[in-house]
Image: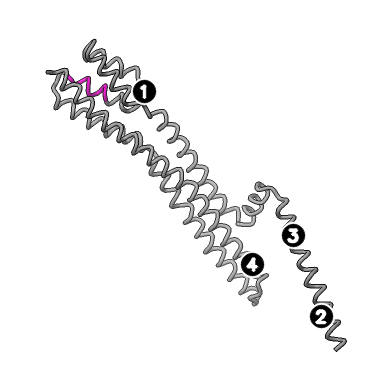
């Protein structure tokens, strides 16, 4: 009975010691900055694959930022532009309206200018010019967006590839050591999990930017279509 009591006492001290050690490790982890933790996980996750995922993130963010800047510059107050063109048509005719469009930035003003430039050829010619040049402007708005969607799909695929290779390394270690203890396979499994996590995080970040860009493009295209209808209505009104 005394031996059992001593054994339980030793086990109790070991248990409490393990708890204290765990809390101490958690305190050290909490003291690490986010940058240090991210750097350590990046190194642990095999820099070869993590580096490729990082390149996908950098290129994707570069495209996203460039598109956002371009789309913000392409956004115009269509109501104000239509009002200005209306006033110019009533006071100075088509040439005055074209001058207003020349002084305004954005795809809507460019479409207006192309339509007004063919006003002498009739309403049908104006409509064809507006539709044709509208397609050109849509192409400019959607430029490089397909590359962004490629990086969104590529990042998790690279992560999954790292997962497969990490598991292969784990099985290789088992074959060499002829042992399936956790210590033998821990490195390979860690690489597998970290590459997957980083790939998914990159895809999520780029997906947010992609959805914002697509919604911005849709908004600009809707404004282009509404403004084009308003331009045709104005030309019909002043042609009478």
Label 2 or label 1, whichever comes before in sequence order: 2
Alpha-carbon distance for marks 1 and 4?
58 Å
Provide the secondary structure element on which disc 4 rests: helix
The local crowd at label 3, few if under 14, some if 14 to 19, many if 20 or more residues have their Cα within 10 Å, is few
Q: How many marks?
A: 4
Q: Which residue is mark 3?
A: 25
Q: Which residues are magenta?
A: 112-119
Q: Nearer the viewer, mark 1 or mark 4?
A: 1
Q: What residue occupies the far right of the structure in this picture?
A: 2
Alpha-carbon distance for marks 1 and 3?
58 Å
**Quadrant assignment, res 103:** top left
Label 2 or label 3, whichever comes before in sequence order: 2
Q: What residue occupies the far left of the structure in this picture?
A: 240
Where residue 113 appears, as percent x and y from the top left, is 26, 21
Q: Nearer the viewer, mark 3 or mark 4?
A: 3
The local crowd at label 4, few if under 14, some if 14 to 19, many if 20 or more residues have their Cα within 10 Å, is some
Q: Nearer the viewer, mark 2 or mark 4?
A: 2
Where residue 68 appears, as percent x and y from the top left, is 44, 35
The local crowd at label 1, few if under 14, some if 14 to 19, many if 20 or more residues have their Cα within 10 Å, is few
Provide the secondary structure element on which disc 3 rests: helix
Alpha-carbon distance for marks 2 and 1?
81 Å
Looking at the image, residue 108 lies above or below residue 240: below
Side (left or right) of 115 relative to 66: left
Determine which of the numbered discs, if any, sits on residue 8 in the image: 2
Q: Nearer the viewer, residue 219 or 32?
A: 219
Residue plotted at (23% across, 27% down): 230
The local crowd at label 2, few if under 14, some if 14 to 19, many if 20 or more residues have their Cα within 10 Å, is few
């Amino acid at each position: 009975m005394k031996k059992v009591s001593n054994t339980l006492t030793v086990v109790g001290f070991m248990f409490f010691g393990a708890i204290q050690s765990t809390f101490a490790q958690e305190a050290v982890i909490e003291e690490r900055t986010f940058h240090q933790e991210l750097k350590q996980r990046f190194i642990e996750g095999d820099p070869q694959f993590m580096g490729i995922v990082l390149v996908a993130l950098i290129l994707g963010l570069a495209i996203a930022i460039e598109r956002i800047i371009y789309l913000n510059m392409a956004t115009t107050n269509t109501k104000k532009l239509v009002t200005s063109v209306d006033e110019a048509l009533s006071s100075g005719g088509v040439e005055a309206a074209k001058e207003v469009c020349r002084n305004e930035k954005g795809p809507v003003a460019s479409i207006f200018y192309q339509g007004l430039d063919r006003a002498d050829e009739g309403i049908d010619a104006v409509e064809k010019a507006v539709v044709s040049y509208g397609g050109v402007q849509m192409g400019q708005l959607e430029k490089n967006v397909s590359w962004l969607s490629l990086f969104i799909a590529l990042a998790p695929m690279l992560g999954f590839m790292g997962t497969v290779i990490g598991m292969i390394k784990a099985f290789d270690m088992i074959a060499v050591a002829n042992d399936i203890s956790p210590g033998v396979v821990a490195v390979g499994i860690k690489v597998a999990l970290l590459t997957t996590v980083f790939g998914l995080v990159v895809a999520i970040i780029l997906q947010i930017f992609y959805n914002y860009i697509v919604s911005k493009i849709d908004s600009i295209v809707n404004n282009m279509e509404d403004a084009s209808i308003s331009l045709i209505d104005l030309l019909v009104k002043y042609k009478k």
